Amino acid sequence: MTATAIESANLFKDFITLNTDGQYSMNFVVEGVHCPACIASIEKNISPLPNVSSARLNLSLRRLKVNWKSAPNPQQVIDTLDAIGFKAHPFDNSGAEQASDEEAKFLLRCFAVAAFASMNIMLLSVSIWAGAFSDITTETRTMFHWVSGLIALPAVAYAGRPFFIKAWRGISHGVMNMDVPIAVGLILAILLSLYETFTNAEHAYFDSAVMLCTFLLAGRYLDQLMRKKTRTVAANLAALKVDEVEKINHDRTTTKVLVKALQIGDQVLIKAGDRIPLDGQIISGETEIDQSLVTGETLPIHAKIGTLVYAGSMNGNGEIILQIVATQEKSFLAEVDRLLEKAMSSKPPTVLLADKVAQYYAPVVHLAALSTIIVWLVLGASLHKAIVIGISVLIITCPCALALAIPAVHVVASGALFKSNLLLNAGDVLERLSQITYVVFDKTGTLTQTEQSLIEASVENQDLLELAAHLASHSHHPISKALQSFQKGKNIALSDITEVPGQGIMATFEKTQCRLGSMEFTHTQDIQNAWKEKYPQATFLGFEFGDQKTIFAIEQKLKTNALQVINYLKSQNYGIDILSGDRAQAVEKIADELGVISWQANAKPADKIAALEALKQQKHKVLMIGDGINDAPALAASYVSLSPITASQITQAASDAVFFSQTLAPIAQIINVSKRSKSIMVQNLSLAVIYNAIFVPLAMLGHATPLIAALAMSGSSILVSVNALRAGKLLKDFKT
Amino acid sequence: MSVLLYLMPIAIGLGLIGLGGFLWALKSGQFDDLEGAAWRILNDDDQ
């Protein structure tokens, strides 16, 4: 191993695991993976690295797993990914997410066993039912019962574990949860069927028992799938905090250390384009800092010796040395984190529809079965007959439709929303969204595009414009991207390119100096004064080439569909508000363009929360949409929250859903889908209740033979699932 | 009737093979990344 490889293995030793086959493996969270082409690109670049035996990117989780035969070198992986444009962070594989993964796999295995058992037992049951109309002999029927029992017993013992375990836990704590009647139903059904088989009698309910398991497990698994997505984002966020930086030692050399190991007073080197790891004060160097993700401020601030910069902001074009003033616990990021946790813990858990129904379910069902037995006994039936009827009541009431009613809708709705570029982050988002009355937007990066765009240039000379664009491409300053459209691909040779922080960039072209930047830097004040009247709220960029001058008016454009979405929200009678951390002029302009009357500028995180509290006092349920780190606490405090995927990881974890596109159309879609889903969920629950209302009396009257039970169960489950498919209909106007 | 005596075990046996296959696929991680699997088939490079 080379010295750097040893160093790297040491630095990340908490994340590297040694497998049973002697290979080392490690997981990385990779940022910027949104397209499938990334899979090929990443795997092709990492696989050939020395000692790497395999590299596999999980697109669903956005994680890369690398296996080394020996000498693991995680730093090399991080650097290689950086070179191709992906930021990677080490990921700790243990934790809550692992547990939920195991749970999901367990449910899936149980479901598989139950499903296969159902299918095979159905073979035999249908034969019996068909034979009941013709001339099946008792011997054949009994043999079929025996074989069904042989399949059913191990199947229910294996696949029924989720219910038996939960039911036992409930009983031992004196709580009657949904699983108790299910477990009781399953056990009684099997016992009864065994008794019937031994006595060569007519009705065996093996098929009902395994079918019950199958449908219920399907519902549970779908439910679990939904929760898995939530945990993924949260776990990925935790990985983000484990970054490493170059710490400057006393002897002027640098060592790579993990951010969490930094102390107050340490000096770190921040290169151009890096993210600032902790709050610090610049002690050397000069640069521009992009704070848009942290405070919402759209214009980068010029930072020099003595300036305080926040953790989470992006370093621009200069290399600086930072002296840490606050460790991770005390940084601005941590403060936001704390506000976030406080907000999350005070959010009342919504009592879901399913839970409401479950509370009444168990006692009612048991009462019904018990009373049936007693009534039949009183009416003079034999003990055997009474018990068979009582158990059949229990079996019929078993909640297949109920278990599928809500998860099925969730899956269909979230699938449709995914097609609209939306990812749900919590289990009950749809239900909460259907209740909102007010929508609050952040401005920067949410309503407006993340990049600045050009309104107009003051001259038409294409060559001059192209020269300006070419010069701009050498600058790290975010505003320079606005000139991209003028680049026509001509090869322009610039020399002596120098960037002057806070002023602009200059270079020499064909022996003459050209400058791009502020008004003073480019001597374009006179043109600017005239243009300031034309575009009062734009920012200006000047360009000078010899004695030719031009200025560019630049602004932040609204995202596509923004006006359409706002109008849609207004038509649905939602109140609308814009809360931004940016200056008043910028916010006012956007508000006017969108026709929004209520807005607030210069809002800090605490201000945003205060505004939300005020709305809450007025009994409004608020949907908050934001992208900056400064929005995170407000997102957690609102009733429901959305954020665009360009948002920081911490914001994405705080919000209930993430939408990834350059348009605001997903917002309209999710509001519409959530209202539809809520009504379909209610319909499904009603269907489940109706089904019970029809079949329970039938069962009480003694007509619930295994055939009827099977028909009822599968019929109601299919009906509920098909109805759930209607939840996937999207709004035509906002199709992306 | 005698036909059933060997047909039924065959049917159940086939079912068990199917179940075994599914459980193996689950264990070997084939269901871990459904999105990625869908897109991998479009990769141009030789296997």
Image (tube, helix red, strand yellow):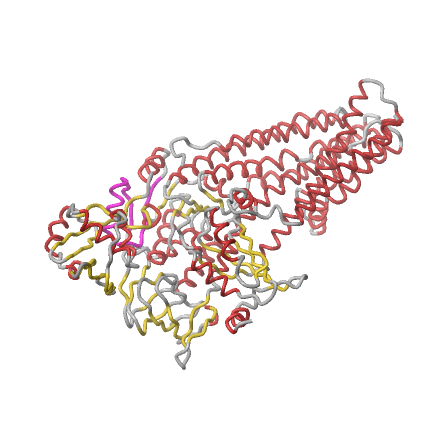
> As displayed, is residue A444 above or below residue A217?
below
Residue sitting at 35 percent across and 46 percent down? A441
> As displayed, is residue A272 above or below residue A669?
below
A424 to the left or right of A634: right
Residue sitting at 31 percent across and 51 percent down? A580
* Percent position of residue A715, x then y: 65, 27
* Percent position of residue A149, x then y: 82, 36
Segment colored magenta: A575-600
The N terminus of chain A, quarter of image: bottom right
The C terminus of chain A, quarter of image: top left
- Counting labels gives 0
* Percent position of residue A727, x then y: 51, 33
Give the residue furthest to the top: A134
> As displayed, is residue A329 above or below residue A561?
below
A531 to the left or right of A687: left
Does A578 appear in magenta? yes
The quarter of the picture where residue B18 lies is top right
Give the residue furthest to the bottom: A251
Instruction: Please state which of residues A593 and A171 is positioned toward the viewer in this rendering.
Output: A593
* Percent position of residue A265, x then y: 39, 76
Instruction: Please state which of residues B44 and A192 is positioned toward the viewer in this rendering.
Output: B44
Does A582 appear in magenta? yes
> As displayed, is residue A31 above or below residue A568?
below
